[in-house]
Image (cartoon, rainbow, N blue to C red):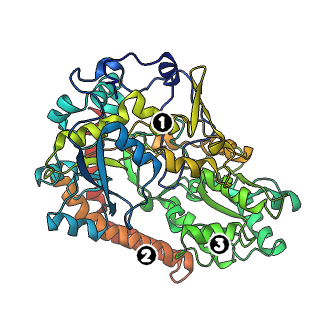
Amino acid sequence: MKSFTKKKIHKSLLLLFGLTLLSAGCSNSSNSSNSSGNNESAFSPASDEAAAADFSYPMAGNVELTFMNEKLGGTPERLPIDDEYEKRTGIKIKQLGGTPMTDQKFSLMLASGELPDIFLNTWLQYPGGPDKAVEQGYILKLNDLMDKYAPNLKRTLEEHPEIDKMIKTDDGTYYAFPFIRSEAGRVYGGPIIRKDWLDELKLTVPQTIDEWHTVLTAFKEKKNASAPVTFRTMFLGERTGGFAGAFGVMGNFYVNDGKVVYGYLEPGYKDYLKTMAQWYKEGLIDKDFASIDAATVDKKMTSNESGATIGWQFYIESYNSAMQETDKKASFVAAPYPAAAKGQTPEFGQLDNAYAGTSSAAISATTKNPEAAMRWLDYAYTPEGSLLNTFGIEGTTYTMENGKAKYTDLVVNNPEGLGSDQVMLKYSHGTNFPMIQQDNDLPAKFAQTSEAIDIWKKTNHESHLLPPITPTAEESDEMSSIMNDINALVKETELKIILGTEPVENYDKYVQQMKDMGIERALEIQQAAYERYMKR
């Protein structure tokens, strides 16, 4: 392959990369289907001049690297995108499976000394922080290596200091190749509800917490739904605002007027738990929510057991596809995050930072070929690599027409009946990969799918986002010591109160217990790190 660093990029390719930055998704989401893939961009891959003059892809030497991701499980299936990446970069990748940073298996792997060449994980969660991982000799500090072997990422960061600020520590250490979500993709989840049931019952899409109570009661009593609303515990109030946003709170740490707060300490959280406990007692919340998985939620949503959930955008697509095979009237739509009263804007919904720390690729300090690791990762930040990650393989998933990518029937009218998001999981890295996510204008069969993001993003969440701060190694160690026990206490208490095994009046006792365990010191650390971040 002729070096893209020396050749002129085709005019259509340059036109194509007038793309806006997407946000990310969640580990279960695909890119936003309502985003435009061909608008003016404030953020695009590095230009030709950014790359080193003496290097060209594919890399010579028949190099093989090992790769570990952050998903718990076995070795992932090899996909067409993997073969294409190998062909273009000249670097073979041996997948080793994965484990999240917070799992004990990750610690055991570090202790064994048998490290992969590339770690994909959430390095902001490393005990002691990313600086500690470098100091302890597990991963490489990338600053000098970026100068030598990652010209595309380097140029991108030079041109976009707002992104550069996010992906380094306070002392300027670069520790991983980041997954940066595009602006359009930063929102990708929220409430989902059966619109056909609402129409049948002559009810409107609920907008307030009281309206949700009315709707769920009707689903139970008039539609015989055994679980009027079903969801996994991750949607209670931490992964998204869930129903908690109506009470002006959310789980975990966030910012109120420049001050870092811990949502579980706020008075509104007690009010929220009181409401959830009452709903559970009335049989409105799935009695199994504390233990169910995503597949079970999907089954309940597509078998008339449930009429509402909280999930990702393309759940709407899959639910409508599944149900309309037997019931043409079935219709799942996005509902807004609930507010306390009609006309109010909820404080919280779901919104990620452009860099949330997830899916970031660090390089092992024991790797024998750091250049190959850097080159393989840097390819994602080239125009060609970004095009591949966004739209897949030309001639297979898209063709170029008038400088724009047009999806083929493999994506739009898949012969196996797969949704466009399912197809693109095989042929692209639309999300959760070290890259700059770009708008992919992914087609949806149902208008309800495309309309969801605009509905879910109407919150005040942006003003509360805690940026990707990096406490010092000492602060991080102290934070871990404090928060490990508090996190366990919070999850246990939350479930006990909702399930009714503990009265909500006892919540004040747990707030005091959190203070006794050091939550106020944790807030001091977070505040200091936040103020340092704002001065970067």
Q: Which quadrant, please, contains the N terminus?
A: top left
Crowd class of label 2 (few under 14; some 14 to 19; many from 20; radius 10 Å)? few
CA distance for labels 2 and 1: 35 Å
Q: Is residue 283 visible?
A: yes
Q: Nearer the viewer, residue 369 or 18?
A: 369
- Please tell me which residue is depicted at 61% across the width and 50% down the height of the picture: 313
Residue pointed to by mark 2: 492
Image coordinates of residue 401 in percent, x first then y, are 61, 24
Which numbered marker is on residue 182?
1
Residue pointed to by mark 3: 285
Q: How many marks?
A: 3
Nearer to us of marks 2 and 1 is 1
Which numbered marker is on residue 318?
none
Q: Nearer the viewer, residue 473 or 114?
A: 114
Image coordinates of residue 70 in percent, x first then y, are 35, 58
Q: Amino acid at mark 3?
A: Ile
Q: Amino acid at mark 1?
A: Ser
Are the residues flagged by discs 1 and 3 in contact, CB closer than 8 Å?
no
Are the residues flagged by discs 2 and 1 in contact, CB closer than 8 Å?
no
